[in-house]
Amino acid sequence: MRIALAQINSVVGDLAGNAERVVGRIEDAKQHGADLVLFPELIVTGYPPEDLLLRPGFVRAAEETLEGIARSCRGITALVGTPHFDRDLYNACAVCAGGEVKALYRKRFLPNYGVFDEDRYFAPGRDLILLELGKTLIGPTVCEDMWQPGPPATELALGGAELVANISASPYHVGKEREREEMFITRARDNSCFVAFCNAVGGQDELIFDGHSCVIDDEGNVLARAPGFEEALLVVDLDPREVVGRRLRDVRRRALAREREEIPHIAVVHVGIEKAPANGTRATGDVVPFDDALEQMRRALELGLRDYVDKNGFREGVVVGVSGGIDSAVTAALAVEALGAERVHCVSMPSRYSSEATRTDARRLAESLGSPFVELPIGAVVDAFTETLREPFAGREPDLSEENIQARARGVLLMALSNKFGWMLVATGNKSELSVGYATLYGDMAGGFALLKDVYKTDVFRLARYLNERSGRELIPQSIIERAPSAELRDNQLDQDSLPPYPELDRVLEQYVEHDRTLEELSNDGFDADIVHRAVGMVDRAEYKRRQAPPGVKLRPKAFGRDRRTPITNRWRG
């Protein structure tokens, strides 16, 4: 049997566009002689459609779109992710064959943790189905169904499935691709069946879907793997007879069947017969290797920015405030790779505290990237604010208020350029700064997208060095990488005057923010007690700022926003 996995990039709400992409891939799969083609979870609507699913008109339009897709399924069977309403709403896998929807499998396990909120929208399914394609039995599942170690995969296997197909929209974080594939390998071995996993790819607001679709045999060998962070059609031939032979020799399934006493009835739906491979050829598929962590971070960040910009219609590109510092340099460099140099507009806004070195480096960065550049000194703007506030500020010493006026003046100028020219403003702050509130509301936090929102400062430096190594030249000036970080809002200011050293701070933040470790646990584990107390206090006090931050690419297992939901008004300190 020849199967195809269509790893495609959908757009939430673009039903017509998504249908066109699906039908195009169905035709491609036919050209490759495929018997079965898999598409990602909720591909009809895009994932996640969130509260669009609460609109009856949207659900009806999705069902009509599915009918159109099904009409193209002649001579091939397609598994298509779609919402389905039948007295309640279900996250479903539609089985399309013979020009119609032959059957619907309803997702059983609805994730309601981290970024997932499926209990809000869907009812859980109960029934299983088996698809009979020639002499092969196929068990369809949807995403989370396969993350569970038992049913439905065990029940499908006991019912005779030689192939368990999983259509998915599994969001990315660093290391997720290996964790996920290892889980599928375990399911294939435990159930003595082939596993085909088709994942979504692309950016949707803060989420990145990394693809890495794969086919695994019943012994846990990866037969084929699609690339990450790009669309692909993975085509591979399977021989289900191999599963039957191994099951006859492996008696563990019989023991499991006896333990269950009664195997639940599973309806079998006949969907067609296998075609003979064209010209006797065999499709083996490639096993595309996983990239290392830094390359995956780069590709995820660029994909997330590119899709956010293009899917939201910012045709003119983006604007980045470049300060001569490391964060804005990495942001601009990634933006240029994602969008092209001509769509990334670099703006330097020096103040009286900006050094000649950072002013020069901001210009050198833009020249290295080949991006349009303009310098807008903010001295006169800040002076105007200072004069306006002279009377109410009388008798008070300059402090953080005057520093933040500079940051906010820059935000005003950047947003003015955004409004005038249609450029989306990309904020440049990183996760370390956002965690502890070392950022100015309506200043450097202003923007439509915060590219480095989930990237710790230490990783920003690693990315800068990696981008230079990858390009084979000094894409980001070395002086920017080597300079001690500074906001340059007062004389001789350095980040380390206000924050613990970033390597130590980031270790604490990772444990406290992502792993929910307590003050006591961190102190007992050998972390510096003073740094722990300072960092945790700053994190807790800054929640109100993070609620007002723009969206940004999710890279870590727990990102601010959809993942980590902490009350602003909160007196718990631990």
Image (cartoon, grey):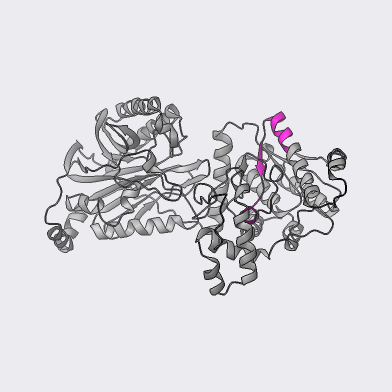
Classify the position of the N terminus by image quarter: top left
- Is residue 249 found inside the magenta-colored segment of the image? no
In this rendering, would 60 be left or right of 333? left
Residue 202 visible somewhere in the drawing: yes
In this rendering, would 526 be left or right of 279? right
User: Residue 488: image x %, image y %?
Assistant: 79, 53
Vertical placement of 470 versus 167: above or below?
Answer: below
User: Residue 449: image x %, image y %?
Assistant: 61, 42
Residue 456 visible somewhere in the drawing: no
Residue nearest the observer in this picture, 567 or 456: 567
Identify which residue is drawn at 22% across, 40% down: 274
Identify which residue is drawn at 39% across, 35% down: 25
In this rendering, would 373 be left or right of 112? right
Question: What residue range appears in magenta?
Answer: 414-438
Residue nearest the observer in this picture, 554 or 513: 513
User: Residue 177: image x %, image y %?
Assistant: 44, 55
